[in-house]
Image (cartoon, rainbow, N blue to C red):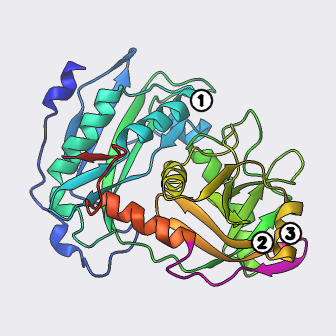
Amino acid sequence: MELVSTIPVRKTTHSKIGEVNWNELVFGKFTSDHMLVCDYADGNWGQPQIIPFANLSLSPLTLALHYGQTVFEGMKAFRMKDGGVNIFRLERHYHRFQKSLERMCMAVPPKELFTEGLIQLVKTDADWVPEKRAAALYLRPFVYASEPMMGVKVSEQYRFVICTGPVPELFARPVKVKVETHYVRASKGGTGFAKCGGNYGAAFLPLSLAKKEGYDQILWTDAKENRFIEESGTMNAMFVINNTLVTPPLSDSILEGITRDSILTLAKDMGYAIAERPISLDELEQSFMDKTITEAFGAGTAAVVAPIQLIHMGGIDYTLPAYTTDSLSSRIKLQLEKIRGGEEADTYGWNTII
């Protein structure tokens, strides 16, 4: 895509970077100075451009607002120990972005546009990448149906936007989760594997109900029988049972987590046994009875791992052992941080250094 090689940059005249307290970052509160915007119409992507961060102007009839054609990605750029900047697992994120857009019948930005757009935007706002280890510049590429039209239809116009913002390292406290057997996150043949907006909006009510009961998050079960664990809130679910790292296999109702893939790869290479297989509630309950379960955690971009201290199922609260620096999840998280920060060799080719 020839246009990508010369992405014009219009710099802001009023940087907000001086307003940031770098010692007290809040996830999602701050946005960097610039964003990338590129429009699709008449079957083609136009000229991408990097402009000062600003509000978008939308028609009330914008199709995304009515029929849900909107897809996003979540990824990070890290400051490395030598002062350089690394965008983590860029190609894998594009692969998932593409799959999500295709499922939602949306135009897919070319790989070069996605890749070079991210690289140029992060270069433009490189000063916004935090210095603190494990803090990051969060990257949010998204596409929405921008055509203004009354009536149910597949949009013929789209806007691709990338926004960024500095986020802290999340020291995730162990959480209490409730197994959900009434509401479902996704069903076979649906959009569970896609990062589309509707998946998240539909989860708010059951999560709110669980929080009223004193739980922090939900363990989703399958839509057919409500017998098998699928995800942990907005993260992939992982368990250590009989000294094996176990996680549900990917399917069209489970998000293809990049952090999930990274953890499984590292765990295997660090000598841990891993298993991607269905995990039933009966097995999970029995593992507590037998004391063979030693860890449970969610895996995702924001926190990397979110330890679980309690699982509520069948009317009973089951408590897990306390987490330590020797826990499998803690050791793998540390190794992942070292690779992203350039403290360990990137033998997997995960880092795109800019």
Nearer the observer, 63 or 273? 273
Q: Is residue 171 above or below residue 99?
A: below
Comparing labels 3 and 2, the label whose residue is closer to the camera: 2
N-terminal of the two: label 3 or label 2? Answer: 3
As measured in the structure, the alpha-carbon distance from the residue carrying label 3 to the one carrying label 2 is 10 Å
User: Label 1 sits on what residue type?
Assistant: Arg
User: Label 2 sits on what residue type?
Assistant: Thr
Q: Position of 294 compared to 260: left or right?
A: right
Q: Which residue is located at x 19 percent, y 66 percent?
A: 16
Magenta extent: 313-327
Residue 54 can be seen, yes or no: no
Q: Which residue is mark 2?
A: 292
How many numbered callouts?
3
N-terminal of the two: label 2 or label 1? Answer: 1
How many C-alpha atoms fall within 10 Å of the one at disc 3: few (<14), some, or many (≥20)? some
Residue 48 sits in quarter:
top left
As measured in the structure, the alpha-carbon distance from the residue carrying label 1 to the one carrying label 3 is 35 Å
Q: Which residue is mark 1?
A: 103
Q: Position of 98 compared to 165: left or right?
A: right
N-terminal of the two: label 1 or label 3? Answer: 1
Q: Which residue is located at x 73 percent, y 45 percent?
A: 186
Label 2: state its secondary structure.
loop
Label 1: state its secondary structure.
helix
Q: Which residue is mark 3?
A: 285
Label 3 with label 2: CB-CB less than 8 Å: no
User: Label 3 sits on what residue type?
Assistant: Glu
Q: Is residue 346 above or below residue 119?
A: below
Q: Which residue is located at x 35 percent, y 28 percent?
A: 111
